[in-house]
């Protein structure tokens, strides 16, 4: 069965960076993209960006341009999301998900989420 | 960017009742590329509907999506205890860099 397993919770100081991993299994990695979504405490969902598992092409939301890096490692079928210049506003649960198709970016399967806390 | 407005914010209903959730877009959603998700406390969201009206794999037929253009609905025909949760809509009909979610509707037990 399809699984996406994310790395554990992180605590970071303002100004630092965080890198969250998303280990996938149960499907052909290069046939799908991986998307990243976050959810601040008590708030709704926010789309961050996504990356093609086939060619590594990325599409990041304008809001995160310049401080968001999404990558993949096809050898380990793992996706990564790195967010820099963290502030307290970046405290959230970060989710990865498998994007249905290259031209239909909804998430069919989700990871369990990774809590990132930014605090001095 | 397309803004999605969900209403009502909270719906208080009893098990067995029907629920209709609304998602209104600030501009027409191309190809009716709209999805619905369910999220329970402490859990990741789960895909319910894509393409405005196609149920995802394993989703009970009491869930149905409808609408087109700027107005979309998710209908739950008879609420089961496990259906009390928060529901989000998401559009993917615009630029791949401008995907957006609605603010959510909480369906709570009356």
Image (cartoon, rainbow, N blue to C red):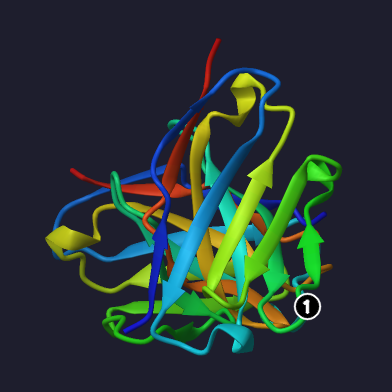
- Judging by the rendered image, the residue that carries numbered circle 1 is B30
Work out whether B41 lies above or below A32: above
Q: Is residue B36 visible?
A: yes
Q: Which residue occupies the foreground of this view, A55 or B59? A: A55
Q: Which residue occupies the foreground of this view, A112 or B48? A: A112
Which class describes the residues within 10 Å of circle 1: few (<14), some (14-19), or many (20+)?
Answer: some
Residue A1 image offset from top left, x and y in percent: 31, 84
Total labels drawn = 1
- Residue at (26%, 82%) from the top-left corner? B60
Q: Is residue B33 visible?
A: no
Give the residue at the far top of this rendering. A120
Q: Quadrant of residue B31?
A: bottom right
**Horizontal side, residue A112 vs residue B7: left or right:** left
Q: Which residue occupies the foreground of this view, A28 or B22? A: A28
Indicate the secondary structure of the residue bearing disc 1.
helix
Quarter of the image that includes the C terminus of chain A: top right
Residue A112 image offset from top left, x and y in percent: 36, 56
- Residue at (44%, 64%) from the top-left corner? B37
């Amino acid at each position: 069965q399809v699984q996406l397993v994310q790395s554990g919770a992180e605590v970071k100081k303002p100004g630092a960076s965080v890198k969250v991993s998303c280990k996938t299994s149960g499907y052909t990695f290069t046939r799908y993209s991986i998307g990243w979504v976050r959810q601040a405490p008590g708030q709704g969902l926010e789309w961050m960006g996504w990356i093609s598992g086939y060619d590594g092409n990325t599409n990041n939301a304008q809001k995160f341009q310049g401080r968001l890096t999404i990558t993949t490692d096809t050898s380990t079928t793992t996706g990564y999301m790195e967010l820099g210049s963290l502030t307290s506003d970046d405290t959230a649960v970060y989710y990865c998900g498998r994007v249905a198709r290259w031209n239909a970016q909804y998430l069919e399967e989700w990871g369990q989420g990774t809590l990132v806390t930014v605090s001095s | 960017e397309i803004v999605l407005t969900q209403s009502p914010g909270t719906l208080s209903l009893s098990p067995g009742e029907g629920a209709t959730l609304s998602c209104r877009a600030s501009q027409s959603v191309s190809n009716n590329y709209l999805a619905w998700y369910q999220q329970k406390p402490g859990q990741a969201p789960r895909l319910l509907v894509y393409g405005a009206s196609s149920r995802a794999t394993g989703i009970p037929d009491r869930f149905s999506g409808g609408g087109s253009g700027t107005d979309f609905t998710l209908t739950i025909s008879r609420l089961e205890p496990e259906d009390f949760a928060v529901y989000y809509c998401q559009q993917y009909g615009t630029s791949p860099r401008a995907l957006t979610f609605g603010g959510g509707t909480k369906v709570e037990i009356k």
